[in-house]
Amino acid sequence: MKVIVPQNKLKEGLSLVERSIGKSLSLPILTNILFEAKKNFLSVEATDLEIGVKAWSLAKVEKEGAIAVPASLVSNFIRLLPEGPIKIETDQTLLFIETKKQKVEIKGGSSEDFPIIPQTRNDHFISLPSGLFCEALSQVVDIPATSSTRPEISGILFSFQKDSLQFVATDSFRLAEKTVSTPKIKVEKEVSFILPQKAAKEIINIFGPNEEKKIGNQEFKIYFTPSQVLIESLMAETPHPQVILVSKLIEGEYPNYQEIIPKKFETQMVLDKNEFLHQVKIAAIFAGKTNEIKFKIQPNKGNLIIFSQNPNSGQHESFITGEIKGKERDISFNYKFLIDGLSKIKNPKVIFELSEKNGEAGPGVLRPLDEQGYLYVLMPIQTN
């Protein structure tokens, strides 16, 4: 291999792939990044066998070739180089990197030992703005819980239906559903799949709005097969891939989450979102080991009283006012779950609805006021 590439382009490519590096002791090759020079491009790629990411940069390729090199070593070195052209050469399993003022030699390995990232492209794909996609995905991505007995809830349900896109995530204690309706999404055939949480986070990291990477808000394509998904973003200069992400899908059927979402509510509150969030965060300081904070709802006074207590530190009580109607009641929630749900709502006003099931406190539901498309369901803490 003999190639010249701008430092900033190579640095950007490495930053896109390095989070997908594997950490397998039994397969040390996964701790490497594969460099490959071909035609007018230099590509870098990494994989942990579940997720694979490959990024390309335009380059002057004098001799094609490939080599696998230690990821942390080469990334740290390239990151510290000044902007300007970098000359890269290989001699068997040695990688030479040269600038105007320095030259280094890095011991690598054979490219033939590096796992091949499958790149399946077919007629089943969807094209849409990456910024819109990633912003919606970010509202549910933190919720799934790792489960060996229920792997389905370890991922996020993606559902593409005509001109809408829906994400669903749950950990059995809470659930979030985000729906985006836009004519920019065109689906010829309805598709749904369960994507691992790690892959979803990498999609946001790579394709989400980011000034440094300058990829967010571009159009990207999503290709589907029964076992994997491939996301591809093209270069601005030429119709060639800039970065692809490939991920395995989680097998199985996602739970019928619609049964969890209450259809009827006994109490409804319309509250200032920032004030509510602020008071919950204060109450959290005094919560005990169970993360419990208690609510007393007084519709006749328009008050929501918030109480928390820790036998080792003390107690806290505050109240906020709002438009409250329905039954007066006492109920407890996990403050961490409340903070997570409120933090994802952008609207200044939030609706907080409480249900009943068989005479007992049922799930609570948070949603933005006068805005369709997002809801957050959380189970109460049963104190009896």
Image (spheres, rainbow, N blue to C red):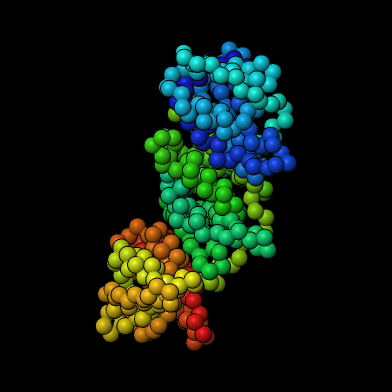
Front residue of 366/262: it is 366
Residue for point 46% across, 70% down: 291
Is residue 310 shown above or below 153?
Answer: below
Front residue of 376/220: it is 376
**The residue positioned farthest toward the bottom in the image shown:** 359
Is residue 356 shown above or below 161?
Answer: below
Is residue 329 shown above or below 336?
Answer: below
Residue for point 67% across, 48% down: 227
**The residue positioned farthest toward the front in the image shown:** 312
Is residue 238 shown above or below 120?
Answer: above
Residue 255 coordinates in the image, percent (x, y): 61, 65
- In the rendered image, which quarter contains the N terminus? top right
Count of numbered tags: 0
Residue 314: quadrant of the picture: bottom left
Residue 44: quadrant of the picture: top right
Left or right position of 271 against 310: left
Residue for point 64% across, 42% down: 23
Residue 101 coordinates in the image, percent (x, y): 47, 14
Residue 273 coordinates in the image, percent (x, y): 32, 64
Residue 110 coordinates in the image, percent (x, y): 70, 25
Residue 294: quadrant of the picture: bottom left
The answer to whether one can see residue 194 in this image is yes
Residue for point 30% across, 63% down: 274
The answer to whether one can see residue 245 in this image is no
